Structure formats: structure tokens, C-alpha cells
Image (spheres, grey):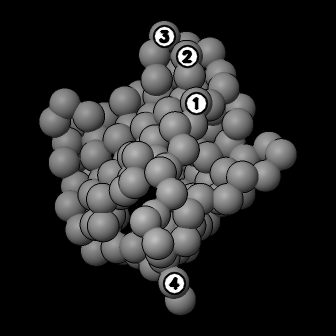
Amino acid sequence: MSTDTNPVEHPDRWILNLRGRRVAKVALDPHLELSLGSGWDVVLESRAVLSHGSALTNPSIPLTPTSRNIAAQLLGTSVLSAIAFKSGALRMVFDAGLHLNCSDGPAGAAWEITGPQGWCFTSMPGGGLTVSPGRAEAQ
């Protein structure tokens, strides 16, 4: 399975192609940051929910950027899917059966994902998504 492909845009979302990337580090101060290696980082700056399976069918745990209980649950897990919705929401699924969901924040960016070659996905206050596309690789 290759994780070297660029994110792919669809009409309502971006597929981030982080499949197989392992959560190598979890930092909790001042924001929740997941380091996935190869230059990919996820920073949650507002409330999110973590659930075992879909948050629609299973109870979820509210997360804040300083939640201490998530480090043990996410550290070492691998990403199965990561989707940045153009509405400003983020959904990540991990191989441990965990689902991380973060919606847009009313006052500031709720989350940001940065990657190699200049990729940057940021939720906008009140909804929406900004994308800084990556630079083309040198041939």
C-alpha cells in the first residue's frame, strides 16, 4: 500500500491519502498534535470526538486539545482513512477501530493538517476549508 500519493480532491471533500501512516507522536500542549511521519502533522485546536466505530452508532468521548486520555489510545495506531470535508469537518479512522471527528470551529480554525511539499488543509471559522496545494515534485 502506497502512502506517497498526493491528496485527491472530490466535489465535497479531499481524500488525504494518509492510509498506513502510523501515529508516531502525540503532543498535548497547547493543542492536540498527531505526528504521522514523513512531514504529515494533524493539529486539533478545538473540541473533537473520539469513538470506537462510527460516532453515529457508538458512544463517543469528547476531546479537547488538552485531553490526556487519547495519547494511549492513538499512539502507534495506523490511519485507515483521513477525509477533509469542504464544509470544514475532519474525519479520521484508525486501525484500532477508533474514529476521530472534528467539526468546524465558530471562532477559529478547529484543525489543520500539514504535509510535505507545502500541503496545508485548514478548517475555517464558521465552516469551510482552505487548501494550500503542494508543489509538484521535481522529475
Number of residue marks: 4
Q: Residue furthest bottom?
A: 1
In the depicted structure, whether residue 28 falls above or below residue 40: above
Kindly report the distance in space between the C-alpha atoms of the residues bearing marks 3 and 1. 16 Å
Judge the density around disc 1: few (<14), some (14-19), many (≥20) Cα neighbours within 10 Å: few
Which secondary structure lies at badge 1?
strand
Residue lying at 66% horizontally and 26% vertically, measured from the top left: 128
Kindly report the distance in space between the C-alpha atoms of the residues bearing marks 1 and 4. 25 Å
Label annotation for residue 125: 2
Between discs 1 and 4, the one toward the N terminus: 4
Residue lying at 28% horizontally and 66% vertically, measured from the top left: 37
Kindly report the distance in space between the C-alpha atoms of the residues bearing marks 1 and 2. 11 Å
Which secondary structure lies at badge 4?
loop
Say what amino acid the circle numbered 4 marks: Ser
Label annotation for residue 107: 3
Q: Which residue is mark 4?
A: 2
In the depicted structure, whether residue 110 falls above or below residue 25: above
Foreground mark, 4 or 3?
A: 4
Between discs 2 and 4, the one toward the N terminus: 4
Residue lying at 46% horizontally and 23% vertically, measured from the top left: 109
Between discs 4 and 3, the one toward the N terminus: 4
Could you tell me if the residues under marks 3 and 1 are in contact, i.e. CB atoms within 8 Å?
A: no
Label annotation for residue 130: 1
Kindly report the distance in space between the C-alpha atoms of the residues bearing marks 4 and 3. 37 Å
Could you tell me if the residues under marks 1 and 4 are in contact, i.e. CB atoms within 8 Å?
A: no
Q: Position of residue 79 (x, y in %)?
A: 47, 70
Judge the density around disc 4: few (<14), some (14-19), many (≥20) Cα neighbours within 10 Å: few
